[in-house]
């Protein structure tokens, strides 16, 4: 038995079997590379599910964590801590938002945003509580975020669902207009649908949704858990589309690997008052120290700009592969979030071949694989990844 296969059998014995894993036991990472328990090297184009914006073991992050761990980790939010306030300041000063609240995950960030919307509806829209979300969206795995998520296969085993959600087609403003009633408090969409397979809306979609929300006095919530923190080539996805949301959720890339989420809002709709919301761990000193250090580095070194530059290299290589493998039906992407569609449900086989060839990928759909490397990925690494992927695809 290899080291990896021993760990895999321990997982099967002891770990709740709720996740479909790839048979790769990762023990170490550096930049875009990771190594498994048997010493094999891979290029990591999963990056912790679009989380490790600065790659693995970036010295800025490891030093911030080590220093904070030796100073202060957790105090509860009964008290003030400095890293939390530094992170709050840098996020607000670099976004269109006025206020932030920190939680521990994307789902929790979205939950907070939705609680804010309901409170806003009570105060300003005569008790309106409904949130319009998009079909094929993904907003998380808690009961409320599963209800918000517009995908029946995440919902049907967990009914009855929390009421108050209306699902409409993505990239269809008229559908939002038709679904809006006196009960509507907010519209919540992702700037680009990530988990659906990197679905990119028309350039003017978010602007038109923004105009509609303004005309109706309802909130626009952008779920930027996946698109935020430079992923699309700007610090926040909304900047790519020339709109400002009222509320925005962040997580994934916000922590550079540590678990943290946040919802940010404009002052005019911050309807929550002391006692309405809270979290034991949310915004604790350790996670916010890492998130602050990473965000400061990200901004000072214009890492989102680098992501935008690398978009061409990534999409160029994927399109080259498309011209060489006839079963690739489409390539699309924005910044360093990209996807490749196949003309049949072969993404499982592609992932297995890719593992073998030394590149880690993700398959959000049976016919789609997704690419979300660290934002620090180099042109040389993209070229190498494309070669490895070519090997993997040649064995299909
Ligand atoms: C991943 C994701 C979530 C859920 O985040 P978790 O940290 O897994 O709870 C919510 N919304 C979007 C858009 C996501 O991509």
Image (spheres, rainbow, N blue to C red):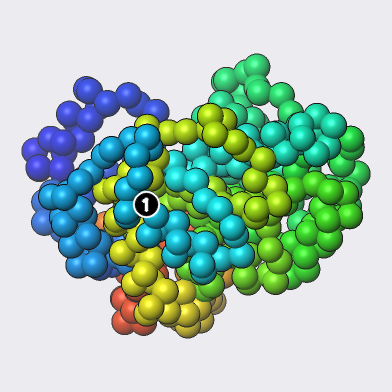
Q: Quadrant of the N terminus?
A: top left
Vertical position of residue 276 compared to residue 99: above or below: above
Q: How many marks?
A: 1
Instruction: State which quadrant residue 393 falls in.
Output: bottom left
Vertical position of residue 358 compared to residue 74: above or below: below
Q: Quadrant of the C terminus?
A: bottom left
- For numbered disc 1, what is the local secondary structure? helix
Q: Position of residue 341 (x, y in %)?
A: 57, 59
Q: Position of residue 44 (x, y in %)?
A: 31, 61
Instruction: State which quadrant residue 43 falls in.
Output: bottom left
Please report the residue visible at 70 percent of the width from the left and 71 percent of the height from the top: 242
Q: Is residue 107 left or right of residue 71?
A: right
Residue pushed farthest top? 160
Cβ of mark 1 under 8 Å from ligand 1: the answer is: no
Q: How many residues crowd mark 1 within 10 Å: few (<14), some (14–19), many (20+)?
A: many
Q: Position of residue 83 (x, y in %)?
A: 32, 55
Q: Is residue 227 left or right of residue 243?
A: left
Residue 316: in sight, yes or no? no
Vertical position of residue 230 compared to residue 369: above or below: below
Please report the residue visible at 65 percent of the width from the left and 45 percent of the height from the top: 270
Please report the residue visible at 22 percent of the width from the left and 23 percent of the height from the top: 14
Q: Is residue 365 left or right of residue 15?
A: right
Residue 249: in sight, yes or no? yes
Please report the residue visible at 74 percent of the width from the left and 70 percent of the height from the top: 203
Q: Position of residue 87 (x, y in %)?
A: 40, 58
Q: Which residue is mark 1?
A: 84
Q: Nearer the viewer, residue 279 or 1?
A: 279
Q: Nearer the viewer, residue 205 or 218?
A: 218
Q: Nearer the viewer, residue 137 or 229?
A: 229
Q: Nearer the viewer, residue 107 or 341?
A: 107
């Amino acid at each position: 038995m290899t080291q990896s296969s021993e760990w895999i059998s321990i997982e099967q014995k002891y770990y709740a079997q709720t996740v479909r894993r790839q048979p790769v036991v990762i023990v170490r990472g550096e930049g875009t590379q990771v190594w498994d328990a048997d010493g094999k090297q891979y290029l990591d184009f999963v990056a912790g599910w679009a989380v490790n914006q600065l790659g693995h073991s970036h010295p800025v992050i490891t030093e911030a964590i080590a220093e904070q761990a030796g100073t202060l980790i957790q105090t509860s939010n009964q008290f003030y801590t400095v890293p939390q306030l530094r992170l709050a300041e840098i996020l607000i000063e670099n976004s269109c938002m006025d206020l932030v609240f920190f939680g521990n995950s994307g789902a929790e960030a979205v939950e907070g945003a939705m609680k804010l919307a309901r409170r806003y509806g009570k105060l300003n829209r005569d008790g309106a509580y409904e949130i319009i979300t998009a079909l094929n969206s993904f907003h998380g795995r808690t009961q409320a975020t599963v209800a918000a998520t517009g995908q029946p296969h995440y919902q049907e085993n967990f009914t009855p669902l929390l009421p108050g959600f209306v699902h409409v087609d993505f990239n269809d403003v008229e559908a939002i207009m038709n679904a809006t009633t006196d009960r509507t408090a907010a519209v919540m969409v992702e700037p680009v649908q990530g988990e659906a397979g990197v679905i990119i809306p028309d350039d003017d979609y978010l602007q038109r949704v923004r105009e509609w929300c303004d005309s109706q006095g309802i909130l626009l919530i952008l779920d930027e858990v996946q698109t935020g923190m430079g992923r699309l080539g700007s610090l926040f996805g909304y900047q790519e589309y020339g709109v400002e949301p009222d509320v925005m959720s962040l997580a994934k890339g916000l922590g550079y690997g540590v678990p943290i989420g946040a919802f940010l809002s404009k002052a005019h709709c911050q309807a929550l008052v002391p006692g309405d919301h809270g979290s034991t761990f949310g915004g604790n000193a350790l996670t916010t120290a890492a998130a602050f250090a990473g965000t400061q580095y990200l901004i000072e070194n214009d890492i989102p700009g680098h992501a935008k530059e690398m978009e061409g290299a990534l999409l160029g290589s994927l399109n080259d592969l498309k011209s060489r493998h006839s079963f690739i039906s489409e390539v699309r992407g924005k910044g360093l979030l990209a996807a490749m569609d196949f003309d049949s449900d072969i993404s499982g086989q592609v992932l297995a071949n890719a593992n073998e060839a030394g590149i880690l990928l993700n398959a959000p759909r049976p016919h789609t694989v997704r690419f979300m490397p660290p934002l620090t990925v180099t042109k040389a690494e993209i070229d190498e990844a494309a070669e490895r992927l070519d090997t993997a695809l040649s064995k299909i």
